[in-house]
Each structure stands twice: as structure tokens, then as C-alpha cells.
């Protein structure tokens, strides 16, 4: 089964800077989603991009999708200390049941 | 809506004991997922239900693990007997099945098997 893989694994930035994370996957997808997980909490859905979309925005989040390269990126602009969390990409396969496959996560630390 | 509710929040038990984790999905959602999260293996899908019916339990590690969903508002994950390697955070998530299904996660149960 396919699985999203985030890169880089860990990122430490100053407040106000932008944070960029990448995700790669292996097979055909219907959509790709990004989730955030704060320490000790469950994952929270951030944004979904469909396979026929190339870019999507939501507040300070910008997601791109390149299906030819099977990759996606998540950009958080003007980061805040509250953005400190782990970020996961998840892919919904276009084969069969459409259930999500999660990557291993990307730890982001925003230093005030 | 209160979101996905899991209980207990923390569970500490001794090896060999039975452990039951509980989940109440968001009202109106028709799919429910159980995940396990560890540092080593990340987030693993154990089993998922659609309309209360188990669809895929291929992620359940062993026969010691079982899950039920007797109705649309309740699900359990049972481990019997428990082992130290079962120590992890167990998440329940629910969603509305469809092409753009998004999952809503509970706060998880931190399980420690001594």
C-alpha cells in the first residue's frame, strides 16, 4: 500500500519565518491531506487537495500537489509558536476503498 | 458536537490483563478507524468500520486484538492478553465516507503495559 513520506523529518525555525515540508507518495491518489498533531493530542485535519488540483490555500497554509512527481508540499507562512507540532501527510488511494495512508510525520518547532 | 470521544485517556495495566478501549464517533459519521501510534512505527491503521461493519482488519497485529462496533455511536478495541509491546497511543477516528473523506481524531488512549 502507498504511504506518504514527509521530508524533512524535523525543522526548527524562528517565529515569523516560513516553514516548508514535503511529502512523497508512490501510487495513484484521489486526494492528499495534511494533518497537524500537537503533543499529547489527536491529529487535526488541516487541508485537502484533490488529484486534479495543483495548489490550495487556507489561511497561512499553502499546499501544492505535483502528481507527475508524486509529491506535495505544505508551506506555513509567518509561523507562530503555536504552529509547533508534528505535521502528517496522508494519501487517499484511487484504488479500492479510498482509505488514508499516513506518513511518519514531520516535527516543526517554532522558536518565539 | 463534542468530537470523537475516547476513554480512558490513560491506561496502565500489567502484562496478561485484558484492556478495553472505547470510542464514541461523531454523530452522523459512518466510518470509524482505530490507529496505533508509536515512535518506531508511526501511525498504523489497525481496523476500520463502515456502517458498523468491519471492512479491513488486516492491520490488527495478532488474535489478541479484537474490535467491535455494535452500533453507530460506539466502538471498542480489546486486547487480551496484553503484552508490554502493546504499549502505545491508540487513536479512534471517524469520518463521512466519500471521495473527500476527512478524518476526525479523538485525543487517544495512552496505554502502558508493565
Image (cartoon, coloured by chain):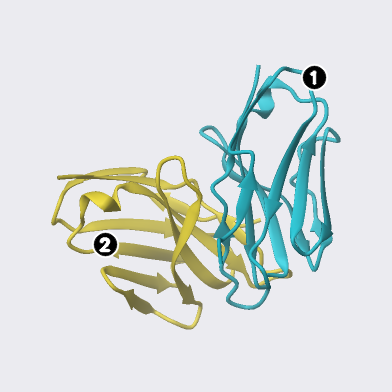
Chain colours: A yellow, B cyan
Q: Quadrant of residue B42?
A: top right
Q: Can you say whether B23 is above or below B38 in the image?
A: below
Which residue is more in the foreground, B1 or A11?
A: B1
Where disc 2 sits, the SS reads strand
Residue pictured at 51% horizontal, 78% vertical: A51
Q: Position of residue B101 (x, y in %)?
A: 60, 72
Say whether residue A15 is left or right of residue A1: left
The quarter of the picture where the C terminus of chain A appears is top left
Tell me if I can see residue A52 in this picture: yes
Q: Residues within 10 Å of mark 2 (few under 14, many from 20)?
A: many
Which residue carries the number 2 mark?
A: A76
For marks 2 and 1, give the CA distance.
45 Å
For disc 1, the chain is: B
Q: Position of residue A104 (x, y in %)?
A: 49, 46
Q: Are marks 2 and 1 in contact (CB under 8 Å)?
A: no
Q: Position of residue B18 (x, y in %)?
A: 80, 28
Which residue is more in the foreground, B65 or A12?
A: B65
Q: Position of residue A30 (x, y in %)?
A: 58, 75
Q: Can you say whether B22 is above or below A76 in the image?
A: above
Tell me if I can see residue A68 in this picture: no
Where disc 1 sits, the SS reads loop
Tag on residue A47? none
Q: Quadrant of residue B109?
A: top right
For disc 2, the chain is: A
Tag on residue B16? 1
Q: Residue furthest front?
A: B2
Say whether residue B112 is left or right of residue B30: left
Q: Can you say whether A47 is above or below A52 in the image?
A: above
Residue pictured at 33% horizontal, 74% vertical: A58
Q: Nearer the viewer, mark 2 or mark 1?
A: 1
The quarter of the picture where the N terminus of chain A appears is bottom right
Amino acid at each position: 500500500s502507498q504511504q506518504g513520506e514527509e521530508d524533512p523529518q524535523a525543522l526548527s525555525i524562528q517565529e515569523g519565518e516560513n516553514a516548508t515540508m514535503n511529502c512523497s507518495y508512490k501510487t495513484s491518489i484521489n486526494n492528499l491531506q495534511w494533518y497537524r498533531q500537537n503533543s499529547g493530542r489527536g491529529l487535526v485535519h488541516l487541508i485537502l487537495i484533490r488529484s486534479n488540483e495543483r495548489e490550495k490555500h487556507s489561511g497561512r497554509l499553502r499546499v501544492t500537489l505535483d502528481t507527475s512527481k508524486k509529491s506535495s508540499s505544505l508551506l506555513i507562512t509567518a509561523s507562530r509558536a503555536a504552529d509547533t507540532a508534528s505535521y502528517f501527510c496522508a494519501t487517499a488511494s484511487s484504488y479500492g476503498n479510498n482509505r488514508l495512508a499516513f506518513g511518519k510525520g514531520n516535527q516543526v518547532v517554532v522558536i518565539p | 458536537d463534542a468530537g470523537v470521544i475516547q476513554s480512558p485517556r490513560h491506561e496502565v495495566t500489567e502484562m496478561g490483563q485484558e484492556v478495553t478501549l472505547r470510542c464514541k464517533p461523531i454523530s452522523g459519521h459512518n466510518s470509524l478507524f482505530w490507529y496505533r501510534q508509536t515512535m518506531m512505527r508511526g501511525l498504523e491503521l489497525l481496523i476500520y468500520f463502515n456502517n458498523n461493519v468491519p471492512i479491513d482488519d488486516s492491520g490488527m497485529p495478532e488474535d489478541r486484538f479484537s474490535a467491535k462496533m455494535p452500533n453507530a455511536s460506539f466502538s471498542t478495541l480489546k486486547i487480551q492478553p496484553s503484552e508490554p509491546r502493546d504499549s502505545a497511543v491508540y487513536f479512534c477516528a471517524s469520518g463521512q465516507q466519500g471521495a473527500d473523506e476527512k478524518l476526525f481524531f479523538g485525543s487517544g488512549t495512552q496505554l502502558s503495559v508493565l
